[in-house]
Amino acid sequence: MIRVVFNQKGGVGKSSITCNLAAISAEMGYSTLVVDLDVQGNSSMYLGYDIHSEEALTTGTSVANIFKQRRGLLSTKQPPDEYVLATEHENLFLLPASIELEAMEKDLESRYKIYQLRKALEQLDQHYDRIYIDTAPNFNFYSKSALIATNTVLIPFDCDSFSKQALYNLIDNMMELKEDHNEDLRIEGIVINQFNAQASLPALLVEELKAEEMPVLDCYLGSSVKMKESHYRQTPLVYMARSHKLTQQFIALFEKIEQIPPGSFQLKDSAAQTETASAH
Ligand SMILES: Nc1ncnc2c1ncn2[C@@H]1O[C@H](COP(=O)(O)OP(=O)(O)O)[C@@H](O)[C@H]1O
Ligand SMILES: [Mg+2]
């Protein structure tokens, strides 16, 4: 199961949502991979890997190598899994971004390598229960590759009127890509992020989207300084503040998209705690 988190607007919560849903998925017991397709490397950083570090620059362990290999630029032929890193969290894996992505983009695009990610992900999909893909705030070669590689898209929406305009443009672009390259592409849901229940504009904007029959997911994410703290500590919320309101909202969102009954995560969680206690 592969999900892309995409919105061509920056700062709407793509990386935060990708990593927090992936962490909950891992805690739920699913072997979960995060693929970071944004050259900024925010998801990689959030999961403890700095794409500007000496290590990253020398080892070449990144999603860029998958493209290089498929472009015939590497002498060895390795399965895509070889470029995946374990994180410090159980069941959670990372295929990091690379600063090389930007320089490679034009060449890949001119050589029509747009279907290559799909092929690599078909292989990875056999190894992992869930794959979450983070994208750049651009409808660029990599975002398009991701939207061709999977049928399921989550669109974060951060409740301002610019976001609403961006959403229409995004849906237009997606529909065009769907027609040309991937007829099974569908929006799994619009994720309402940084929803402020006290203000009237967010509720109004969300009501407008619903009235237009946009697929708004009914579990809204609020705004909390915990999110910034969690980025700073490079630790997704479920590991850092399990009972925090925002973490619980992420869990509810996860249960919704997974179509499992509300409370499933907590049940699993308490069963795991009982197991650990009896093992001691
Ligand atoms: N629910 C939230 N509450 C508070 N801050 C948030 C929330 N979601 C995102 N942010 C903050 O907004 C900024 C942009 O989020 P990010 O996930 O990097 O967006 P994107 O990947 O779309 O650019 C970050 O500083 C992040 O900490
Ligand atoms: Mg991001």
Image: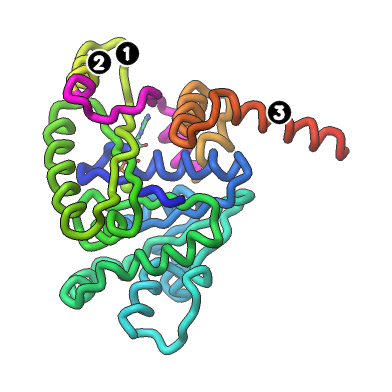
Q: Nearer the viewer, residue 190 or 235?
A: 190
Query: Is label 2 in a helix, a strand or a loop?
Result: helix
- Is 60 in the magenta? no
* Residue reaching furthest to the front: 183
Where residue 132 appears, as percent x and y from the top left, is 43, 50
Q: Which mark is residue 197?
A: 1
Query: Mark 2 touching mark 1, by CB under 8 A?
Result: yes
Quarter, ligand 1: top left
- Is 225 in the magenta? yes
Q: Is residue 222 visible?
A: no
Q: Which residue is mark 3?
A: 270
Query: Mark 1 touching mark 3, by CB under 8 A?
Result: no
Where residue 177 appears, as percent x and y from the top left, is 18, 54
In the image: residue 262, left or right of residue 51? right
Q: Is residue 206 visible?
A: yes
Q: How many marks?
A: 3
Amino acid of disc 1: Ala
Q: Which mark is residue 203?
A: 2
The C terminus lies in which quarter of the figure?
Answer: top right
In the image: residue 197, left or right of residue 169? right
Amino acid of disc 2: Ala
Q: Residues within 10 Å of mark 2 (few under 14, many from 20)?
A: some
Q: CA distance from mark 2 to mark 1?
A: 7 Å
196 shown above or below 225: above
